[in-house]
Image (cartoon, rainbow, N blue to C red):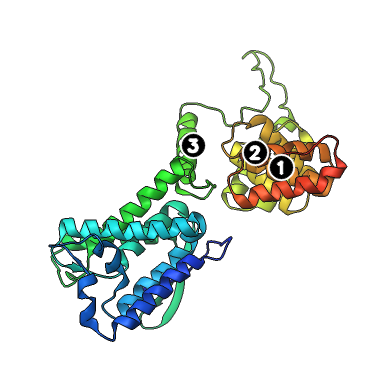
Amino acid sequence: MLLPIRTDSPLRSTPWMNWGIILVNIAVFLLARRDPAAIDPYLLSARDPALADYFTYSLFHGGIWHLLGNMLFLYIFGNNVNDKLGHAGYLGFYLAGGVFAGIGHVLTQSTFLYGASGAVAAVTGAYLMLLPRSNVTIIYLLFFVGTFEVPGMWFVALFFIKELLLPFTAERGASDIAHFAHVSGALFGAGVCLGLLAVQLLPRDQFDVLALLQRWNKRRQYRELVSKGYDPFGYLPKVRPEPLLAPAEPADPSLQRMQDLRAEISEALAHHNHPHAALLFQELIRLDPQQVLSRQAQLEVANQLASQQLYEKAADAYEQFMRHYGNFEQVEQVELMLGLIYARYLRRYDRAKELLIRAAARLHGDREVEMARAELRRIEPLVSGPTNV
């Protein structure tokens, strides 16, 4: 038996709307136990559906394990979706997910539908779009009890595939489960959140599914360019080839060392050894201050230098990044980081002001915008000119 018990996605606010939905489901379940027959008019009949039934059916559950299973999934995935959508948006999304799950059931089956599974499936579909890189901790109950972590993307995708395939299997022991309602809810949740991200009605960040696809596409393009002869070390000075008959001169040792360092930095980053990569990068810059790595490598090294509190070196690395990769789609995050370093540690207040104003105008997350504005207010007496954003 496998059950999710938590996710590693951080929350910025208390998801009280999700907790409210969970408490309402529990309260309705307890009230319905007094007279189980009284709930029949509120279930969704596939043969004779009423409009109100699309909203009421999801409040009723067939038993305690049916309720606990749905509420567990809602707790694991709903808290983070609530955090992303806001309280009113999450409530509307949850109700709409239940409606679309009910429509999917009515179009494909002829039985009564009850339970929050369809709406919960919509929440899991939204989670897949918003937080595909998060890990979910799974508890397994076999001959002994233990836990392990899997990427949330794979957990939700396997759940969706299972629900899609089970109705067509030869074993029909689970025929009382509304698989198509689950599939409809998941498709609704994923589609709505993907659309909201695409038109930027939801705040974008580097962890959503669109950012993941963009990075994958850029890596694909990079591999294609390299296979066609693109030189990824194109910022190194070119060495003019000597005539074939001319006597060979010794290679420039500093040039050879720079090439070796760049290769070693790439290898260190590939093995997630960021401290060693940062150390090698400092040696590279001592040999040639104009050296710049590939976009992702330059950013990772700059972040590592900042985490080691080597703020001057980190600032130089970020500046080099912005000079060469100014069209980076999330450059406002780099501007925010660099502005904070200049303001808090290097006392370059004029440059900090310039960067923080630009970042505040383009950032999407409320927390990041407020961070930039708070720092601008703090340094306002230390810079010349008004600080308005």
Is residue 289 left or right of 160 when viewed as pictured?
Answer: right
- Above or below for 214 versus 246: below
Q: Nearer the viewer, mark 3 or mark 1?
A: 3
Can residue 13 be seen at all in this image of the molecule? yes
- Crowding around mark 1 (Cα neighbors within 10 Å: few <14, some 14 to 19, many 20+) is many
- Above or below for 62 versus 380: below
- Above or below for 285 versus 147: above
Q: Residue at x 71, y 33 (%)?
A: 291
Is residue 268 left or right of 197 when viewed as pictured?
Answer: right
**Contact, CB < 8 Å: mark 2 with mark 1?**
no
Q: Quadrant for the C terminus, please.
A: top right
- Residue underneath mark 3: 218
User: Label 3 vs label 1: CA separation?
Assistant: 23 Å
Is residue 208 left or right of 178 when viewed as pictured?
Answer: right
Position of residue 204 measured from the top left corner of the image (x, y, whole percent):
52, 46
Position of residue 57 measured from the top left corner of the image (x, y, whole percent):
27, 68
- Residue underneath mark 2: 361
